[in-house]
Image (spheres, helix red, strand yellow):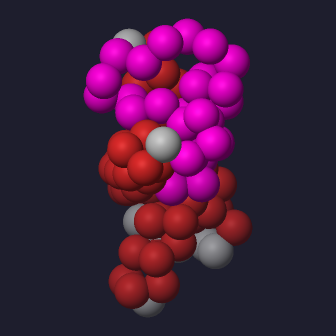
Amino acid sequence: MLGLLLGLASGAIGGNVAGNVMKSNMGTMGRSITGIVGGTLLSFILGKLGIAGMADPLAGASLDLPSILGNVLSGGVGGGLLTFILGKVMK
């Protein structure tokens, strides 16, 4: 459960950072939701592929350091990436 929460939070942060950098007009709530979705999707995909110790956020992963860092990194990157893509499409 902790991995999922970390992935969600880092996805929201990644989405807001990407949205602020590109000055998107999605608003804070829109960037947060987009970031959460993107971060969760990337964490899930990387967890299923078994890449670099990333943990599937929905599978109740262990609390080891690589899993936690993997969820935070993939959440932030996935959230930022999806927000960036949607920000470009909406312009």
Residue sitting nearer the eye, 14 or 31: 14
Q: Residue furthest front?
A: 50
Q: Is residue 18 visible?
A: yes
Q: Is residue 18 above or below residue 2?
A: below
Residue sitting nearer the eye, 2 or 47: 47
Q: Which contiguous range is marked in magenta?
A: 51-79
Q: Is residue 7 above or below residue 18?
A: above
Write down the quadrant of residue 52 in the picture: top right
- Asked if residue 52 is among those painted magenta in the image, a careful observer would answer yes
Left-right relation of 13 to 25: right
Residue at (60%, 54%) from the top-left corner?
Answer: 77
Write down the quadrant of residue 31 in the picture: bottom left
Q: Is residue 32 visible?
A: no
Residue at (46%, 77%) from the top-left corner?
Answer: 85
Measured from the top left, where is residue 42 in percent x and y? 44, 52
- Asked if residue 9 is among those painted magenta in the image, a careful observer would answer no
Write down the quadrant of residue 80 in the picture: bottom right
Left-right relation of 90 to 84: left
From the image, which quarter does the N terminus lie in? top left
